[in-house]
Image (spheres, helix red, strand yellow):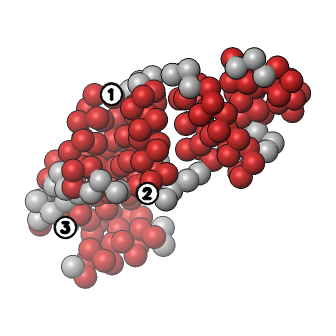
Amino acid sequence: LLAYEYSKLLRKTAKNKQAEEILTTLIATDSLNPNFPYQMGLLKEQQSDSLAIEYFEKAYRLDPNHLPAAVKVVTDKIKNKVFEQADTILTQTLKIDDSHFQLSNLKALNHFYQKDFHNAIAGYNKLLELNRPSENVYLKLGFAYAQVLDFEKSIEHYTIAINDYNDKNPDAHYEIATSFMALHYYEKAQRHLEIAM
């Protein structure tokens, strides 16, 4: 335990070689402890080493309840467009903790990238239920609602993104303008297009 904590301290103070030596020894000593490969993954990630994901995957294989490792693995799956595997992991891990913000966010994002906008909407609304609003959540909701032709809801969420977070985002103004145009509110659409330009 002391060696493990010391390796974490070394990693945080950028003494990477020493941290790696300790973690390598710990992994060899106790190959079934998922925390050791997870910490090695963090160390490799800090060094921009592509081997990081292998350590995160090993930690997750050793313990499917290791949520920090699951977050890293799912993030990589989504990045590499392996959406079905990401969804499988997300479904399993959200059974453990259905209020886990990062996993809930990744689930919504996974649906969003697959253009499964109905489920993306449900996922992003879950983030709002978890009291985790953000500009990104409102932008994604605005876009997803527009894709399912619910332009009123699209406008509602873009308005929050613009008014509460960033009124200088040209993409948000352009997107809200397209929703206004779909509802034939041309003057409002024109105003937002001019702001976007």
- The one nearer the camera, 159 or 86, is 159
Q: Where is 152 relative to 53, above or below?
A: above
Q: Could you say which disc has been placed on residue 130 in the image?
A: 2
Q: CA distance from mark 3 to mark 2?
A: 37 Å
Residue underneath mark 3:
26
How many other residues sit within 10 Å of disc 1, few (<14), some (14-19) or many (≥20)?
Answer: few
Residue underneath mark 1:
82
Residue 193 vs residue 141: left or right?
A: right
Q: Amino acid at mark 2?
A: Leu
How many other residues sit within 10 Å of disc 2, few (<14), some (14-19) or many (≥20)?
Answer: some
Q: Could you say which disc has been placed on residue 170 in the image?
A: none
Residue 181 on image: x %, y %: 74, 18
- The one nearer the camera, 89 or 72, is 89
- The one nearer the camera, 44 or 173, is 173
Reading the chain from its start, which is encountered first: label 3 or label 2? 3
Q: CA distance from mark 3 to mark 1?
A: 31 Å
Q: Mark 3 and 2 residues: CB-CB less than 8 Å, in contact?
A: no
Instruction: Decide if residue 52 is in sight here.
Output: no
What residue do we see at 35% from left, 56% from top? Answer: 100
Q: Where is 18 relative to 152, above or below?
A: below
Q: Mark 2 and 1 residues: CB-CB less than 8 Å, in contact?
A: no
Residue 86 on image: x %, y %: 30, 35
Residue 147 vs residue 23: left or right?
A: right
- The one nearer the camera, 86 or 147, is 147
Residue 65 on image: x %, y %: 19, 56
Reading the chain from its start, which is encountered first: label 2 or label 1? 1
Which label sits in the foreground, 3 or 2? 2
* Element assignment for label 1: loop
